[in-house]
Amino acid sequence: MRALVKYEKGIGKLEMREVPVPSPGPGEVLVKVEAVGICGTDLKIRDDHFIYNPPVILGHEFSGAVAIVGEGVKQWKIGDRVVSEQHTLACGHCRYCLTGKRQFCLSKRSPGYLIDGAFTEYIKVPASLLHRMPEGMSFEEAAVIEPMAVAAYGILGRCGIEPEDYVVILGCGPIALLALQLVVAEGASRVLLTGIDADEKTRFPAAKGFGAYRTVNVMKEDPVSIVMADTGGMGADVVIDLSGAPKAIVQGFDLLRRDGRFCALGLPTSDVPMPWAKVALKAVNLVFSYSSDFESWERCLSMIQLGKVNLREFTSDIYSLESWEEAFDKAASGEALKVIIKP
């Protein structure tokens, strides 16, 4: 089968290769991949700015249909339309696994960078990680659920949104636009998104359509003065970082009110100088979040079924696997809400 492989360390080092079709073992299923989203992580791996274990097939935001059912799997059958969590090789018996937090298991190896991923035709996954796609949902829409679940886990599960919260989202990438919809659905009164010049063409208008109160280009405007004017000098109730930019993260503490909540979801490529005294004097509730859990996936699927989140607008930029270079460039340009590859 065809696969997009990061074959060695370094910038670039990606190529299409023929690889064997994996065979599912006991408790596993083989999924025929129908759609895969390009994540910021994929771009970082291309540019050698993220952990990975070459040679490895990239891609982890995928949907597909069950093709083969492994021994002992009873709850799935051939043809079932599915999406999958990322906690492959979780041991099942450590403290994290036994308390429902297998995303933290030290044995876990996520597909797409530590083990083979989904930019290919077939992928094998543990049956326990699968979730059933809702009726009427396209494979392209379903490929967006994984980043949505990451946002839901951190923002709704760990940080929390209360009715009438003033929320600032740092960044205007795909996860930020999904986070916006989650926050609006939870009853936030006003949501402000920050971004840069590249976001003005496509992502800022999309944010307005998804319910953003305001978008701010930080290359042209000062978000701190805007938020303080909006809140009578108090600051936002919640700041969510999805930019991963150290400068934006530090500025986020200036945007936040005393006793406010800061949800750290973005992954910087360099260390962030923490303004410790400022954070301490504001008594900031700082919440870090990583990956997702079973409940966040089910929550997302429910919200989609109830019409609280729109994924259709994320499915307009679709490329073949052979056109992966063009697809990666489009994803890096900021001119698409989401770029999806169909093997």
Image (cartoon, grey):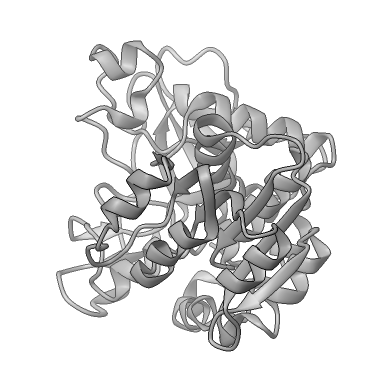
**Which residue is more in the foreground, 22 or 304?**
304
User: How many labels were placed on the picture?
Assistant: 0
Looking at this view, name the residue that lies furthest to the left.
9
Which quadrant of the figure contains the N terminus? bottom left
Query: Which residue is painted at 30% across and 30% down in the image?
Result: 104
Residue 130 vs residue 123: left or right? Answer: right
Tell me if residue 30 comes above or below residue 119 in the rendering.
Answer: above
Which percent across, then down, holds residue 207?
73, 66
Query: Which residue is painted at 46% across and 36% down in the image?
Result: 292
Which percent across, then down, holds residue 101?
37, 22
- Mark yes or no: residue 316 visible: no
**Which residue is more in the foreground, 61 or 283?**
283
Residue 263 vs residue 64: left or right? Answer: left
**Which residue is more in the foreground, 64 or 287?**
287
Query: Which residue is painted at 20% across and 30% down in the image?
Result: 106
Which percent across, then down, holds residue 218?
55, 80
Residue 334 is drawn in which quadrant?
bottom right
Residue 36 vs residue 47: left or right? Answer: right
**Which residue is more in the foreground, 48 or 121?**
48
Tell me if residue 285 comes above or below residue 178 in the rendering.
Answer: above
Residue 314 is drawn in which quadrant?
bottom right
Tell me if residue 25 comes above or below residue 301 in the rendering.
Answer: above
- Mark yes or no: residue 297 visible: yes
Which percent across, then down, holds residue 33?
53, 50
Query: Which residue is painted at 29% across and 26% down in the image?
Result: 90
Tell me if residue 122 comes above or below residue 13 in the rendering.
Answer: above
